[in-house]
Amino acid sequence: MRTFSIVKPDAVAAGHTGAILQALEGAGFRIAAMRMVRMTKSEAEGFYAVHRERPFFSSLTDFMSSGPAVVMALERDDAIAELRRLMGATNPADAAAGTIRARFASSIERNAIHGSDAPETAAFELGYFFPGVELT
């Protein structure tokens, strides 16, 4: 099974990309595709369009377009659920010890990593960042 993930700008800026990749691979994920991106505000708005009416939309898209991020296609059995477990709760204060967000996130918005929450979401997100790419 395949899912999508982003090492967010806060974690990239803090130098945590390598440790997060190590955690992913250590949990049995295979990286099928990966690239560093610098989203424009418009690209961030398109990616997070599902949240357009939410009060945090503007600050979220400002944050996601504030610096480089690493986007990935990840594979393993039960990839979506396993990535969600490994990431930890959205709010790092609620994240279980040892999860990526407990280790590297500083707030509910600057929470180090994004992961798809459903097969349909993963399909959209993979297509958004890897259009026309045959994933290995």
Image: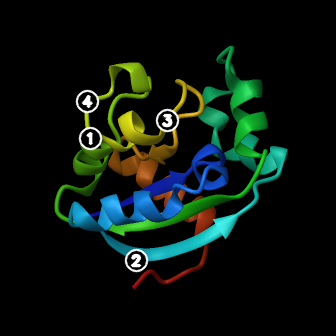
The Cα–Cα distance between marks 2 and 3, rounded to whole angstroms, is 25 Å
Q: Are marks 1 and 2 in contact (CB under 8 Å)?
A: no
CA neighbours of label 3 inside 10 A, class few (<14), some (14 to 19), many (20+): many
**Percent x, y of residue 40:** 82, 52
The Cα–Cα distance between marks 4 and 3, rounded to whole angstroms, is 12 Å
Q: Amino acid at mark 2?
A: Ala
* Mark nearer the N terminus (1 vs 2): 2
State the SS at label 2: strand
Q: Amino acid at mark 3?
A: Ala
> Dot 3 corresponds to which residue?
105
Residue at the extreme right: 41
- Residue 83, relative to residue 133: is it above or below? above
State the SS at label 4: loop
Q: Are marks 1 and 4 in contact (CB under 8 Å)?
A: yes
Residue at point 48% right, 45% down? 114
> Dot 2 corresponds to which residue?
32
CA neighbours of label 2 inside 10 A, class few (<14), some (14 to 19), many (20+): some
The Cα–Cα distance between marks 1 and 4, rounded to whole angstroms, is 6 Å
Residue at point 37% right, 44% down? 100
* Mark nearer the N terminus (4 vs 2): 2
Quadrant position of the N terminus in the picture? bottom left
- Residue 36, relative to residue 112: is it above or below? below
Question: Would residue 126 appear left or right of 95 to someone viewing this image?
Answer: right
Q: Nearer the viewer, mark 4 or mark 2?
A: 4
Label ID, residue 98: 1
Q: Nearer the viewer, mark 1 or mark 2?
A: 1
The Cα–Cα distance between marks 3 and 1, rounded to whole angstroms, is 12 Å
Question: Would residue 19 appear left or right of 38 to someone viewing this image?
Answer: left
* Mark nearer the N terminus (4 vs 3): 4
